Image (tube, rainbow, N blue to C red):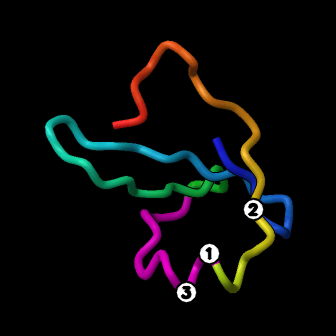
Amino acid sequence: MWEDGGGTKWFGVCPMGENRVTLFSARGSYPADGLDELLVTNGPWRLVYRDENAPPF
């Protein structure tokens, strides 16, 4: 789980068998498109939680 510069929590989801991550807002919005722009406009980002038992991809 990530938190953007505005305090919104985001969940990174990696579809089974793929090596890409899609971000979903905890506010219930649709998956984020254009991650490059999102990361810049909603920064700074910080990692809030990571399941240490799950592989990164």
Horizontal side of 45 relative to 21 (left or right) equals right
Please identify the residue farthest to the left as the structure is shown. 17
Q: Are marks 3 and 1 in contact (CB under 8 Å)?
A: yes
Residue at the image point whose x is 75% and y is 54% from the top: 3
- Name the residue type under label 3: Glu
Return the mark for residue 37: 3
Horizontal side of 18 relative to 22 (left or right) equals left
> According to the image, label 1 marks what residue?
39
On screen, residue 23 above or below 34: above
| Image position, residue 15 (x, y; %) | 25, 42
Horizontal side of 39 relative to 44 (left or right) equals left
Mark 2 vs mark 3, CA separation in Å: 13 Å
| Image position, residue 54 (x, y; %) | 44, 20
Residue stretch in magenta = 29-39
Closer to the chain start, of discs 2 and 3, is 3
Return the mark for residue 45: 2
Q: Of helix, strand and loop, which one carries label 2?
A: loop
Quadrant in the picture for the N terminus? top right
Residue at the image point whose x is 76% and y is 39% from the top: 48
Quadrant in the picture for the C terminus? top left
Q: Of helix, strand and loop, which one carries label 1?
A: helix
Return the mark for residue 26: none
Q: Are marks 2 and 1 in contact (CB under 8 Å)?
A: yes
Instruction: Verify whether residue 13 appears in magenta.
Output: no
Residue at the image point whose x is 62% and y is 75% from the top: 39
